[in-house]
Amino acid sequence: MEDLIGTLTTFGLYLETYLTSLSADFLNHKKRIFVGYLAISVVMALVFLCAWRGLGLRGAFGKVFDKNIFWSRSAKADYFIYAINRIISILISPYLIAQGAVTTLLFFQLSKQNVIGFLSLDHWPSVLIITLYTLTYFFMDDLSKYFVHRCMHRWQFLWAFHKVHHSAETMTPITVYRVHPVESIIYGLRGSIVIGAVIGIFAYCFGIDNFSLATLLGVNLFSFIFNIAGANLRHSHIEIAYWPWLEKIFISPAQHQLHHSIENKHFNKNYGAMLAIWDWLFGSLHFSETGKSIRFGLRPNEASATNIISIYLKPFVEISNIFKYFYTTLVKLLKLNILR
Ligand SMILES: [Zn+2]
Ligand SMILES: [Zn+2]
């Protein structure tokens, strides 16, 4: 009996943690889907539709809250994946590499080089250090996201996981969470390594207590600007574009929507998270094409998973097929004495 009570209590605690975490992102102003940012995005969408597209307020409301989009099969799958991913993240988060571990490792490795006297810059004005740290953090974070995203598209075994995000056929702000857990782990590791390294280097150069991020209302300054500038509209059917010169610097919502396009000419374009500069520099920039309706989803030759279980398991099957293919090719080559 006591065992049963103990099990039920543990289950109750897990359930409480889970239910709290489900709603937490909507109430946390550090998260993109915070209700405040969602409300700002709705206002931006309404202003855009009324002022630029000439719709009346009623028509604009109808377009923003189109029930054919928010209750489509694809959107329902998004909500379901969001709920399941929360359970998975509660279960695996204690095992993920901590950013602090990378920071400490790098800091001590640098300290051992015995050039700390040469690089000790802790006498610099704190405004300069904070500005430098905030900019370095932002650029390194964004650049590393660009490269990981690019690899997700270029490397077949990573594409097997990233395909889950691209299988959305209608987009709502929750689509940002339509990701395979393996993709979340890869991005988490990226963050730990890159941000850990930046913190480690700054701690080494300026002293552990001498730098911090510039924030606004407790949120990283750049994330705050990104979120109040309508980041939620990237995963939506409201195609807000910027001027071409600005689309070379920042990814507009329409540019990210184009990244989800089914058309061949849009494929492998606009990998950028916040900045478009990386796409511009590395040849993957595509300006938005307003006025044309874009179909979202996977191309017809990409077999898309059709139910929740296969969405989670299919990438592993695909990867085992890739390895099987390499293995059989290698065996064939060895038999032909080509590799001897
Ligand atoms: Zn992508
Ligand atoms: Zn996306």
Image (cartoon, grey):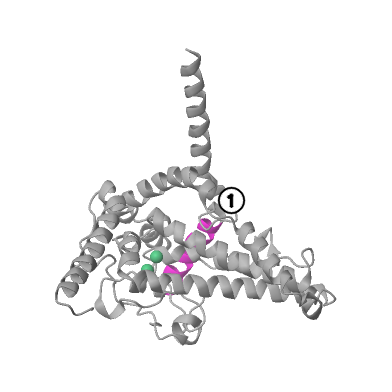
Quarter of the view holding residue 61: bottom left
The reply to whether residue 124 is in sight is yes
Ligand 2 is found in the corner quadrant, namely bottom left
Q: Which residue is mark 1?
A: 28
Quarter of the view holding residue 30: bottom right
Residue span colored magenta = 37-54
Instruction: Give the number of callouts.
Output: 1
Extreme residue toward the front, this view: 340
The reply to whether residue 72 is in sight is no
At which x and y percent is residue 331?
Answer: 19, 68
Extreme residue toward the top, this view: 1
At mark 1, the secondary structure is loop
At which x and y percent is residue 62?
Answer: 36, 57
Q: Is label 1's Cβ within 8 Å of ligand 2?
A: no
Is 151 displayed left or right of 315 in the figure? right
Looking at the rendered structure, the kind of residue marked 1 is Asn
Q: Give the quarter of the figure containing the C terminus.
A: bottom left
At which x and y percent is residue 169?
Answer: 28, 61
Quarter of the view holding residue 191: bottom right
Residue 16, magenta (yes or no): no
Residue 103 versus residue 180: which sits nearer the camera?
Answer: 103
Residue 50, magenta (yes or no): yes
Is 229 displayed left or right of 266 in the figure? right
- Identified at 51% across, 21% down, the residue is 6
Is 194 displayed left or right of 79 in the figure? right
- Identified at 52% across, 24% down, the residue is 9
Is 298 displayed left or right of 195 in the figure? left
Extreme residue toward the right, this view: 123
Q: Residues within 10 Å of mark 1 (few under 14, many from 20)?
A: few
Residue 187 versus residue 320: which sits nearer the camera?
Answer: 320
At which x and y percent is residue 192?
Answer: 56, 61
Characterize the magenta stretch by its predominant secondary structure.
helix
